[in-house]
Amino acid sequence: MSRPMKMIRPAIRLLPGVAGRSEAFEITVDPLRSLGAVRTMSKVLTEQNLNPNVLKLEYAVRGPLVIRAAEIQKEIDQGASKPFKRVIRANVGDAHAMGQRPVTYFRQVIACVVLPELIEKGGYPEDVKQRATEILNAMGGKSCGAYTMSHGIELIRKRVAGYIERRDGHKANWQDICLSAGASNAIKNVLQLFIKCIDGKPTSVMIPIPQYPLYSASLAEFGLSPCRYFLNEETNWGLDISELERARDEGMKSSMVRALVIINPGNPTGQVLTRENIESIIKFAHAHKLFIFADEVYQDNVYAEGSKFFSFKKVLTEMGEPYVKEIELASFMSVSKGYMGECGLRGGWMELVNMDPVVQANLYKAISAMLCPTTLGQTAVDCVAKPPQQGEPSYDLYIKEKTAVLDSLKNRAKMIVETFNKMDGFTCNVVQGAMYAFPQFKLPPKAVEAAKAAKKTPDGYYAFKLLEETGICIIPGSGFGQRPGTYHFRTTILPQPAMLQEMLDIFQNFHKKFTAEYS
Amino acid sequence: MSRPMKMIRPAIRLLPGVAGRSEAFEITVDPLRSLGAVRTMSKVLTEQNLNPNVLKLEYAVRGPLVIRAAEIQKEIDQGASKPFKRVIRANVGDAHAMGQRPVTYFRQVIACVVLPELIEKGGYPEDVKQRATEILNAMGGKSCGAYTMSHGIELIRKRVAGYIERRDGHKANWQDICLSAGASNAIKNVLQLFIKCIDGKPTSVMIPIPQYPLYSASLAEFGLSPCRYFLNEETNWGLDISELERARDEGMKSSMVRALVIINPGNPTGQVLTRENIESIIKFAHAHKLFIFADEVYQDNVYAEGSKFFSFKKVLTEMGEPYVKEIELASFMSVSKGYMGECGLRGGWMELVNMDPVVQANLYKAISAMLCPTTLGQTAVDCVAKPPQQGEPSYDLYIKEKTAVLDSLKNRAKMIVETFNKMDGFTCNVVQGAMYAFPQFKLPPKAVEAAKAAKKTPDGYYAFKLLEETGICIIPGSGFGQRPGTYHFRTTILPQPAMLQEMLDIFQNFHKKFTAEYS
């Protein structure tokens, strides 16, 4: 047994960026902890023998910028003097963290499920009491402390099927609904099914660029190849079939393209697909035998005049044969977005359409080892799938709260786009839906050089400067992917109106100063 | 594009068992759904091109027996006539489902976090109100609907470090604590780091036989090899170092053995390791450069006279150099077991000891794409890590509830072992800890033949018969692994005393009848 190595733990490490789209991921090791850390042996598990896919994996939404943002907030809390009073976290779609209030009915039901004595003692409306009782009756030992079936409580799966039927006007099978701890979990569980080389070629999955980086991170983790198709910024992030064809042709040269991810409404891009566009995408998937991942977690977040959400399930059903029987689809939904914003509760679901029953049974088997999604996340799903109905005591307040959130988001979506479009060197597409703006901006050549010297992507360099000087935390476009030579960032539209106005004012000043500095 | 296939969906499929330990996994496709299912195309995703690791994966604790148990209960609920009144689910460590009551303090705190108006209005004790306030202050926007850091809320990670310090008498770094949605999630996240061939050899991980099948399932899923060491049934499921040496030597012939899983207290076997045994295991791991997975989720469940729980962290710390600085360890804990039994809330943590900081940063990066563990599971962790203290208003009730649960489990552990040992052909080791008995029993040759004819393992055949005739659901030993030619099953000790007595009576009658039938 040899233990020859003596080395100091690194204080900062740079991981290699993934070609073409990623900013470098910095890992900061707490310097205090490094002090006593002279190594006396080589470790069992090291960077050299670590799962290479984990090394490769990147998730910009919670990357080094966000870690630094948390540090800065801590410094402020501990009395450090900064040119700003607080960090504004516009990096992540986290509505409650930005001041949005929860829907009263949801929280009353969950509290009653946690502490059933509240059903009698709490003085809550009858529909709250009834709902909590129904849910408890469907739980083992009438306790949210019991495990549930791995794909979720049957009652709640049935409620989700009902929600989908009302949304689409078509039948949904509750056996094809699988509850999950948020959409991300479900997406990974389905993606994982595709890990297999076919005829010696790796499997690849078509993802949009820009994309939500869960996809690139999960593909990296699973050793699957991304087959990237570009959204068309000129047509408000439109999805061109010719670009899908180009990307697939390119992908098929070195891999087997087997699935297609669509994010609608778009994250980070905010477009809402038209019905005609969805029909064309379904035909494309059918022609090339692609399994469709429909990431529809923003289905309640549609703001623009003339835009409307159509689910892939609805459209393919109405297209009739052969699509209705042949397109394999997984559609994902979450309680984290919409008007609910209950990110922390971890609730979501997927609907599986036309999946081979043996494959589906294997999927359900694979998730069973993880026991079950959280019962309180499932309770939140129940409330979303069947909110208070007209005539029930909680209905008016529910509608009032829901409408207030969605109206306010609609105003903020407009305000943010207008502001960016007024800024020198900025262009920003209409935010038709979802929770983000993804403006393009120009960077002076000197800034690009400075970024290079600092071993950062130009937009990453800009974002770090913005954070350090103003406390505003946004995510550079390189974390989502963008056409080479263009620079973007994603900001949420979630700060409450006054804070959003403040943020946009600070942003404008920063950008003027930055541009002057590097011109 | 070719679509030549016309085929009927299979009504029942048998997946091949994994050599040496597994029962066949039956997948039953709902016959109603199969009716309209004449296929007009080959699917994109089929059994043939599915991730082969997912096909291989098995998790007996929620396998076909348990699916059948749920069906039977449903048949009873719908009025079917059976020779028993209800299914007794002794298959899974799900305390609340079997009638255990939650700890009042925990639920009061969680309810206040869900619905903060309860802090003022609910009339709860001061320590409940204070705790809920502290937790809310540590959440984004003071809402459990906000995301947290991916490794959990800092306040709660610090509380867990405090818990470990009080338990072990040694320092714990809160930065090395990572919260999770139950222990299973954390175990998989660390196991995943080992997916890499070393010098052309696959990595293998040492697991006990019998084992908790999360390990075999996750190894299969990740394409890692199990290196199986047998526990010694003769010495109350003792862990012999000579057997560890044998298993490793064997494993090294075809793989690189890089990690060692220890489950203490044991699942399904119920042994509690002595301090001396743990010291020897640590020396073995050190000599062979193995990373230790210490599955310590049953640390509060120790019943036998003279048995005491020692954490691996405590023992290696007290062994001094070189172990204290060189042994790499991940220790896992959950709120699902112990006296809490809060399985449905999905809360847990791991402590990482001596992990290479670059590896640890990569681990934290990898989990960040899954956003965060549920906030209410984290809240439960907070309560477990720092329960009411002496002098606080909730203390007496907390102690009373905790003691009642643990005392009752102790009695049931004894009662179940005594009963099995009285049964013809049964031997059952002392349940020193955890929540299960794992008796060995003899099967008549005719029963073994009948099982073969039915394409079932002999113990699986027995377990299915038991379920159909009595409604008792236990898991056959083949789901956990056992020495060839021996038969066991795992039953929980969780049914409340009266139901446990009833279950054991029914069991004895069944066994007599079964033995007579096949003799």
Image (cartoon, coloured by chain):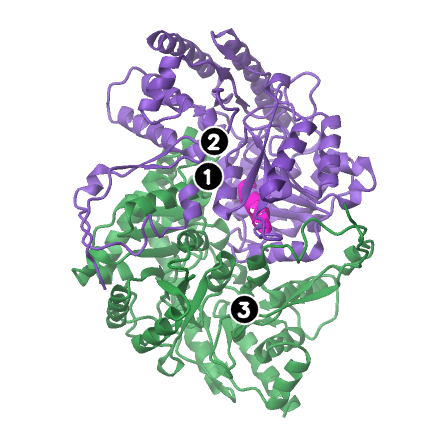
Chain colours: A purple, B green
Q: Residue at x 77, y 59 (%)?
A: B9
Judged from the image, the secondary structure of the residue bearing numbered disc 1 is: loop
Dot in front, 2 or 1: 2
Indicate the amino acid at tag 3: Ala
Q: Between A362 and B177, which is closer to the camera in this rendering?
A: A362
Judged from the image, the secondary structure of the residue bearing numbered disc 3 is: loop
Which label number is shown at residue B90?
Answer: 3
| In the depicted structure, whether residue B27 falls above or below residue A303 | below
Dot in front, 3 or 1: 1
Relative side of B429 to A366, left or right: left
Cα separation between marks 2 and 1: 24 Å
| In the depicted structure, whether residue B433 falls above or below residue A182 | below
Relative side of B207 to A407, left or right: left
Q: Position of residue A459 (x, y in %)?
A: 42, 22
Cα separation between marks 3 and 1: 34 Å
Which label number is shown at residue B371?
Answer: 1
| Chain that bears disc 2 | A
Q: Do the residues bearing badges 3 and 1 touch, measured as CB atoms within 8 Å?
A: no
| Chain that bears disc 1 | B
Relative side of A8 to B329, left or right: left
Q: Main secondary structure of the magenta part?
A: helix
Cα separation between marks 3 and 2: 53 Å
Judged from the image, the secondary structure of the residue bearing numbered disc 2 is: loop
| A362 is within the stretch colored magenta | no
| Chain that bears disc 3 | B
Indicate the amino acid at tag 2: Gly
Q: Between A245 and B287, which is closer to the camera in this rendering?
A: A245
The lab-note entry on whether marks 2 and 1 share a chain reads no
Magenta region? A181-194
Dot in front, 3 or 2: 2
Image quadrant holding the N terminus of chain B, namely top right
